[in-house]
Image (cartoon, rainbow, N blue to C red):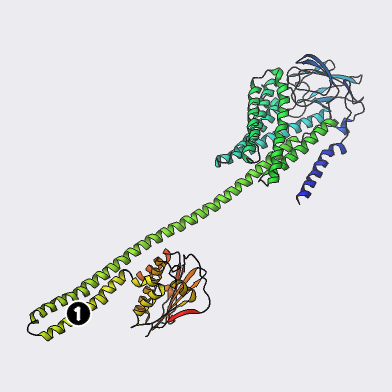
Amino acid sequence: MRRSVWLGLFAAAAIAVCLPVLFTHVPPKGSGGSINLSKWNFGAGGPVPLTTGWQFSGRSGAGSETAQGTFLPIRPGVYKLALRTPPRAQSLALYLDDASDLRIYAGTRRLSPSGARSGTPFLETLSFRPATTGTTVLTIESRAAGSVSRPPILGEPGQVDRLALLALLSQAVFVGGFLLLGIYQFAVFLGRREDRASLFLALVCAAVALRTAVGGSDLPAIFLPWLTSVSRLRAELFVSFAALWAGVCFLGVAFRSQVPRTAGRVSSVVFAVGALISVGLSPSSLPWLQDTFHVLLAAYFLLMGLVAWRGVRQGADGTLLLLLGLFALAATGLHDALTVAIGLLPLPLAPVGLAVLVGTQALWLAQRTALQMHREAVLSRENERLLNRADQQLRDLRSSRTLLLEREESVRRDIAEMLHSRVQTRLLLIWHRLGDIEQQIETVPDAVRASLAAIRADLDAVRERDIREASHRLHPSVIDLGLLPALRTVADSYADRLSVRVRADRSVTALDRSPHKRFPLPLRLSIYRAVEEALQNTARHSEATRVAIYLRLRDGRLRLRVRDDGVGIDPAALSPGLGLRSIAARVALHDGTWRIISAPGQGTALEIDLPVPTPETIVGGGQFGTSTRRPS
């Protein structure tokens, strides 16, 4: 799939590059200081770019210089070209980027932008009538470096007007589009200060827009008429170096792992120095700095290509779009170079390629920002859910603490009542009986022996019943023997009212009997108290005669079920009292779950599911193991 995509892109680029050759008329090239356009039909073939055939005379760093060949507008001097025009040509016009610092002659007549005005607002045409001899010498005196950025274009006045209007509109659209994109990226940076890639891309867009506005063909002449050609060239070079610096910073931030650290630092320093030099360099050296900038620009695009290629091979995010943007820029640049080499009318597509390159990066940043915002929204919802859960757990914890305090106070109150009403009364009765014995000890020996036997029985009752019950309320010592013995003991305490059966599967029995893998004491105590509360509620409210207690171990979780054959309840109308709230608190302490299953006339079942934090999980199976039947 990827190979077919690349093949399609190469085919489209080849077609785009070859279209100027296949579907346009190639004008003649100039040579020897002249160009023969006597057979050229401007109406069918269109305007002609005057690129080659110029005679140049001026001064270079080594002295005077005379040369023939390509029009080089960045070099000051005198350019001459003899035009052999068609015999019936009535009027022709020239289109230049900016003629304010140029002296232009058609023969001996000087052409001025304030001459013949075209019908298009804001645009002026350099019109002239060809010589009757058929040859008109075109002379252009460039007094400063960087006067224009492209060679002159010769055509009929209407054609030149349309060409100038198209250039003006395209530059305005280009500048406006890049400014809007830069403002958008800067707004994204203001909203997300950690996303510095958006900041540097905004700087790139602003620098490109400013460079086009300053170095364009018509915009400076309309909106910045007070700028001289040298000032324009300085501003253009400064903004161009600033754009490259921002571009290197963008690569370093957006593709940090693909950009070599040394290359990024060196490039930033070079571009920063170039921007500073462009401000103070002498006007005669500005063309050299412009040539240097072109070399550095090529090196920057090579660095960008290396980053894109490495990123695509490593599967880095965004590098495929970067490579596609570079491919579009290379294709449009090749198109422009081919049109200039052939001598066709230059319809520059490189700005379109640059817009595609910057647009792909803006699209990638937008996708990344949207993905990050989506992740932040998901994290925010998850954090909100966790906070709500933590808040609920905190409320449950407070409720459990309150419940435990209430339960503890209830136990204290019961024990105090038992000690005060039962134990104290019995001990007081024993004290009075000892006083009676003291009076009878000499007169009625047999009665004394009977009284002592009764006192001994009362003391045994206090010790065995009251004190043991109080101790059991504080902590059941039988729980240390294991979970099943403790449950059987609590079942025995209800033998006079209920028939309680305790059953457990083999896994529970094996784990409870093992001294090393026994259920943890907190878990045993919680189950014991839950069963105790359930039996107490059953004895008080259910009118049941039989209760079955089931214990089963599955997948590391202990499942307890206490079921009676009582009258049942309506779960919807159930109002949890202190006992059920105590069960809920103990179950929550172990991250377990519980529920009550009941219906009127069908008995009641309490089901508890608790995780077992044992070193090894014993997975049980089969029928229930031990069984203990209690008499009714």
Residue 83 seen in the figure: no
Quarter that holds the C terminus: bottom left
Residue 211 lies, in percent from the top left, at: 68, 29
Label 1 neighbour load within 10 Å: few <14, some 14-19, many 20+? few
Q: In this rendering, is residue 548 above or below 168?
A: below
> Is 31 in front, or is 90?
31
Residue at horizontal 70%, vertical 25%? 221
Residue 592, by quadrant, is bottom left
Residue 331, by quadrant, is top right
334 relative position to 593: left or right: right
> Is 412 in front, or is 579?
412
Residue at horizontal 51%, vertical 73%? 620
In the structure shown, which secondary structural element does the residue marked by tag 1 occupy? helix
> Is 77 in front, or is 523?
523
Q: In this rendering, is residue 49 above or below 185?
A: above
Residue at horizontal 23%, vertical 76%? 462
34 relative position to 358: left or right: right
> Is 293 in front, or is 95?
293
